[in-house]
Amino acid sequence: MRFHIEHTTEYDYPDPASESFSELRLRPRDSLRQKVSRHQTLIEPGVLVESHIDYFGNYVETISIPYRHQRLVISSACEVETKPFNDALAALDLTIAEARQMYQERRRELHDFLRPSQYVRLVDPVREMASELLPEAAPFAESLLRLNDHLHRTLRYRPGATDAGTTVEQFLQRREGVCQDFAHLMIAICRAAGLPARYVSGYIETDAPLGDDGRPSKALIGAVATHAWIEVFTPTGYWVGLDPTNNMLDGERHVQIGIGRDYADVPPLKGVFKGGLAQSLSVQVRMTREE
Amino acid sequence: MPAECPYSAAVESFDETLLAQGMGAEIYGRLRDHLSQNEPPELERLSDRGQRLMRDLGVTFALYNEDDAADWILPYDLFPRVIDPETWKFLSSGVIQRVGVWNEFFRDIYDSQEALKNGVVPFELVYDDPGYQRNAVGLSVPDDTFVHVAAFDLARDARGRWVVIEDYVGNVTGVTYGLQARAVLTQAAPELLETAPVCPVQGYPTELLEHLRGFARGIQEPRIVLLSPGSYNSAHYEHSWLARQMGIPLVRGGDLIVLNSRCYLKTIGGIEPIDVIYRRLDDAFIDPVAFRSDSTLGVPGLMTCVRKGTVTIANAIGTGLGDNRAIGALLPRLAKFYNRGPLSLPGVERRLCFDPDQRAMIESDPESWVIQHVSERSNRLVWHPGRMEGEERSRLLRDLRRHPERYVAEPILPLTQLPTASANLDRRHAGLRLFVFGGKNPRVFPLALTRHATEPNSRTISSGLGGGIRDTWILRGDETSPSPSPSRPVFLTAPFQRRLRLGSRIADSLYWMGRYKARAEQATRMLLVLRRLQIETAGRETADRWAPIWAALARATGHSSEHVALESEGLDDPSYRLLLATDNSASVARCIASLHDNSRGVRETIPPEVWSAVHRLHQQCEQAQEAMDPSDLARLSDLMQSLLDAVDQLDGAAGKNMLHDDAWHFWRLGQNVERALSTTRITREVLVKHGRAATEHAADLDLDALLRILSCQYAYRSLYQARPTAPNVVALILQDPALPRSVLACLEDIRASLATVSGSSRHAASASPQRSVAKLANAVEFADLGALFTAAEVPVGSAANKIAKPPGPSGLLPLGPWLDELGDRLSELSVEISDHHLHHQAFNILR
């Protein structure tokens, strides 16, 4: 599927900001399952945009605006083609304990995705869920799908229920949150069970096209801005995507921006500036499928 | 071999003077003889002199335990440590080898990580360490050098062999204390130094600078800055001293800015590109966008410059990983892996608690070990199970079992001791730190730091916990005789062409130093003069004669009226409150504290003599605040006089020692703005409030007071040779260009300073403060003073130069509003100077 994605973020500063410096992670990554044919980032006020690839292979752009400004608009536009791919979980007939055994050879490369990280604390409730939902003797593929389903059923998706700093523990207490919280919790449970898991930041097509019967097929849940889901490493050497917010495997309607240990490694925007604290933010994402 | 001591069995303690052999033993013998010859009082006098020099040089350290992080003067001992040439050679080659292995380790870790792939170092050790910077992986650094400067702490093991007990390859501290220890000894007891061929150390800062210039990616005249965490860091003294000695700007994160992958310094003349950053700020804080976003100390975007290779960071980003003691313990394996082994200078036999066998060893006999946090270098994260009580100890051992990866253990080493310069030459435990330059051609400089415990049998040598310092003598052998480096120029070189202009923050501090100094001085003189007038006129005038003038002057110097309110019973003299009261934010003591604070932040920019003078002034105030009886007016007067003397000394030190450069001009600007302002305000308060309705006699007294407060009574007499009259006094105070405190003289000085600092400024075209000061000077010089003393509606001055304000309510002299307006315009001028040179938003050059 081919998508055209426009992602616009606007900051307004009642007291002028100055000496602002930001890192943007907005350009979708190239991978076996998706190809970026065009990408452009426009900044207002006009400044030079520089780029580099980070530790996790994500595409990062940086901007600095030294002089006083009251408005900052970051617009990213891209064309991405996603490709169909095989279900990497389908052919896996092994238990979680066997899978863990098979990770041993790649322990070093997978280490970052097995350890707790800033947003993924392996607190006691998480460990309890791991031993209950991903017991050693259980089948690997089936258990992951069941975990995906379990989270989807037992926790509620509600925009605004949490913020960017919400921890896994808080999410478990409130039992409602956004895609980022679902992703962090599922990653935590996987890691607690010894399964390497990583965070995916991206976009999801939310307005489904009309089905054969002329009615829209079921719309998918994505954040107004960006979406988040997870990937688990299979003993056969693939990262397989699971979207607990939508209770599905990732598919052609998911577009990946970047990956990391958790949100802290791939925030779409991260920056500092001097000036008054008050600021208003508006984010708009438009994702349209091109035939 | 000097590294092996004659004792074979383990001993409780070693006396270094007894372990020394050959030349070392001989020098120690001479030192003992020399110092024991002195009678105890003489020895005490010498020691006191050393300690006083430490204070004057400001050799301080902020103690961890003290809440108010006040500067702590390090204890000093005159008895030096002696290292003979052979030992020095052995130790140098050992630490040079070690720094090479560390550098190779970082080069590998931030590239292909062969040591981890091959299991030489468990990858968990690196990946789980917060000092491992994922952002720095894959970045190349100039000359493949990560460790530009390193230090190593040495001790002796039970067999008397030298071992490295601590590796410092990230943020290296302490070198300044080593240098100052020599400076103090040279001044306090020069005769001691004559007893031995000691390698000189004073060339170290220059050597360090030249070393760093070698990493500027081939730039001929690189611009180098020292990036510090600011004046509240415990090592601030070291940072500022070193920057000054190296002749480079000491900057904080906020002084630098990143634009398009290039790092710039904000200066009074615009922004200037920077090539090398010698940083004393940890990785985690150095760039709030790439690392900890809560850091306010760093430079946002600095990592983009590192990535593009436009700036060299020394030591490189990611070297904080070297604080990990478990990795340090694996150095012998790394040395072998990188074909650089075996290590000639071993590390202490450190045990890694995550290894079950090694942990079992510690658990079976905890009392023989010192437990440390694996990477935190804080003094608080060191535990001695042998000195801990039951519950505390079991808690530690429980945590050790739960989080073994957090701990390492080391055997308790013998106390190595050195004599102190006391009557019995009592011994104290002492530690040794060596400093190494890393890079393509690693080398050592013959400089070391010896720290010692101040209590018998104590192992506490850390400066942060009250340990002292002493000089370290590295003796010249045949080979260690000074060998000039081959690249050193022997001809006269042109001065540094691309000299950096003064940093804006520093200029701001100097400006305020000038203002606070002038304010404190003026207020003190005013108090002293009034006090004397009161005494002189005691028989003739009633006691409350001076009350209104007190009140007026308090207003003129920014006090709220409550501080001069009259007590119901008789008159309470307000001297103490205006001078020292802690609850009075405008007091002289507060001004001096502000002067001190501002100086502290820019200590590297001002000559040590000026810092000492400020420091003494501040100490005088603090001591007086503690000890002074508020009602002891005689002693208060003495204090005022001695404060004025101290201010004169400060002026003298500044005039004599400061380069007359931009920094000087901002210090002058601050003083002159403040003087012009206070002269204007005091004149207004004394003459206008009380001059109007006063009797002739009273007016005479007021005029006399005013002249004395502004110290111009002699100037007046020599000029007029007559009784003071108000118009004459005002003409003198405002318009006499020869009187240093006159408003006109101050304005002319401001004009000259602004012309100098704006000279090469990119914004000279819009030099608004220059225009304002010129207009103001004209207005004062050509003011028609006669008209100001006529109680009528008069136009003030000519149209072009007039300070426009309608005359006040009828009966009031126009002088009052005129002086008010002058004061307002002087305040505006101060704001203009700040906006223009100090808080500039002057990035138009890049737009």
Image (cartoon, helix red, strand yellow):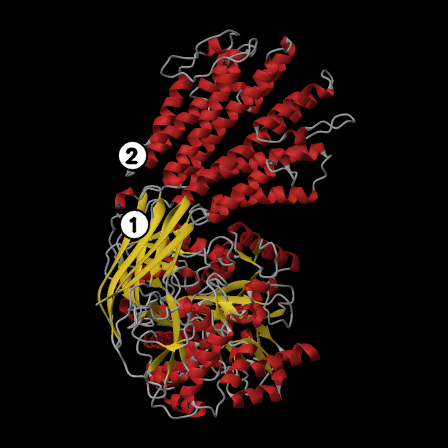
Within the image, what quadrant is residue A256 found in? bottom left
Res A136 label = none
Who's the residue at 61% across and 23% down the image? Answer: B552
Who's the residue at 72% across and 39% down the image? Answer: B629
Residue type, mark 1 in image:
Glu
The answer to whether residue B408 is seen in the rendering is: yes
Looking at the picture, how far across and down is residue B453, in whole percent?
59, 67
- The residue nearer to you, when weighing B296 against B609, is B296
Q: Which residue is mark 1?
A: A44
Looking at the picture, how far across and down is residue B452, in whole percent?
56, 67
Alpha carbon distance from label 2 to label 1: 30 Å
Chain name for mark 1: A
Q: In the displayed structure, does residue A204 sit left or right of residue B804?
A: left
Looking at the picture, how far across and down is residue B398, in whole percent?
62, 82
- The residue nearer to you, when weighing B451 against B201, is B451
Residue type, mark 2 in image:
Ala
**Tag nearer the camera, 2 or 1:** 1
At mark 1, the secondary structure is strand
Locate the C terminus of chain A and report the quarter of the image it occupies. Answer: bottom left
Q: Are marks 2 and 1 on the same chain?
A: no
Number of residues whose C-alpha sits closer than 10 Å to that of mark 2, classed few (under 14), some (14–19) or many (20 or more): some
Hey, which residue is sitting farthest front in the picture?
Answer: A213
Res B764 label = 2
Total count of labels? 2
Within the image, what quadrant is residue A233 found in? bottom left
